[in-house]
Image: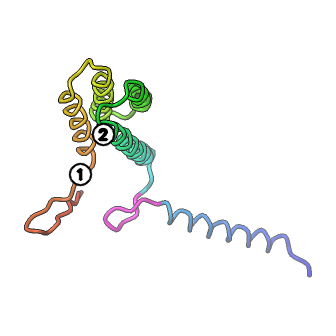
C-alpha cells in the first residue's frame, strides 16, 4: 500500500484545520450569544480577572484563618505573629481591585497579634477582623433577595 505524498499533505492540512477550528471554538469568548474576537485587550482583561479571582480566594482563606484564631479565645502570641507574617507575605502585592480588602486583612492580622501580646483590646481585634470580613465580602456580589425570591444581578452591554 503506497501513500501519495500529496494526498498525505492534503489530509494533514485538513486535519490541522479541523483541529484548530475545534480548539478555536472551545476558547473563543462569547458575549450575548455572539463570538467575540479575542483581542490583546480582552486577553489582558481576562488574565487580570483570573488573577483577581485567585487573590479573592486567597484573601478568604487568610481572613478565615484570622477569624478562626480569634474564635479559640486569646490566641498564643507566637501563633498570632506567625499568622500575621504569613498574611502580610500573601497580601502585600496584588491587583488594585483587591487593595482595600488586602489592607484590611493585613490590619486585622496585625491587630490580632497585638491583642495576643496584650498591646490591644479584644474589641479592637474583633472589629478589625469584622472589617476584613466585610471588605472581602464586598469583592463578591451577592444576589438580592425580595419576598423570598432571589434576584441575581445581570450585567448587560
Check disc 1 and report the residue beneath it. Answer: 141
Q: In which quarter of the image is residue 122?
A: top left
Q: Quadrant of residue 142?
A: bottom left
Depth check: give the residue in front, 132 or 22. 132
Q: Where is residue 156 in the image (x, y as percent from the top left)?
A: 23, 59
- In the picture, measured across the screen, residue 55 lies left or right of residue 19, that is left
Image: magenta residue range = 28-36
Quadrant that contains the C terminus: bottom left
Q: Which of marks 2 and 1 is in front?
A: 2
Please tell me whether residue 86 belongs to the stretch shown in magenta.
no
Depth check: give the residue in front, 62 or 153. 62
* Residue at the (67%, 66%) spot, across then down: 16
Label 2 and label 1: CA atoms lie apart by 21 Å
Q: Residue 67 bears which disc, if any?
A: 2
Q: Where is residue 126 in the image (x, y as percent from the top left)?
A: 21, 34
Q: Quadrant of residue 41?
A: top left
* Residue at the (50%, 64%) spot, across then down: 26
Q: Where is residue 1 in the image (x, y as percent from the top left)?
A: 92, 82
Name the element at disc 1.
loop
Amino acid at each position: 500500500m503506497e501513500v501519495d505524498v500529496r494526498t498525505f499533505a492534503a489530509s494533514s492540512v485538513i486535519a490541522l484545520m479541523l483541529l484548530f477550528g475545534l480548539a478555536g471554538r472551545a476558547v473563543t469568548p462569547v458575549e450575548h450569544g455572539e463570538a467575540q474576537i479575542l483581542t490583546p485587550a480582552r486577553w489582558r482583561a481576562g488574565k487580570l480577572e483570573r488573577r483577581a479571582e485567585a487573590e479573592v480566594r486567597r484573601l478568604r482563606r487568610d481572613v478565615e484563618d484570622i477569624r478562626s484564631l480569634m474564635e479559640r479565645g486569646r490566641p498564643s502570641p507566637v501563633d498570632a505573629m506567625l499568622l500575621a507574617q504569613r498574611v502580610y507575605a500573601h497580601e502585600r502585592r496584588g491587583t488594585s481591585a483587591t487593595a482595600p480588602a488586602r489592607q484590611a486583612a493585613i490590619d486585622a492580622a496585625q491587630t490580632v497579634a497585638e491583642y495576643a501580646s496584650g498591646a490591644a483590646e479584644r474589641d479592637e481585634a474583633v472589629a478589625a477582623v469584622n472589617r476584613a470580613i466585610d471588605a472581602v465580602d464586598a469583592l463578591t456580589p451577592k444576589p438580592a433577595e425580595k419576598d423570598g425570591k432571589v434576584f441575581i444581578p445581570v450585567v448587560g452591554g
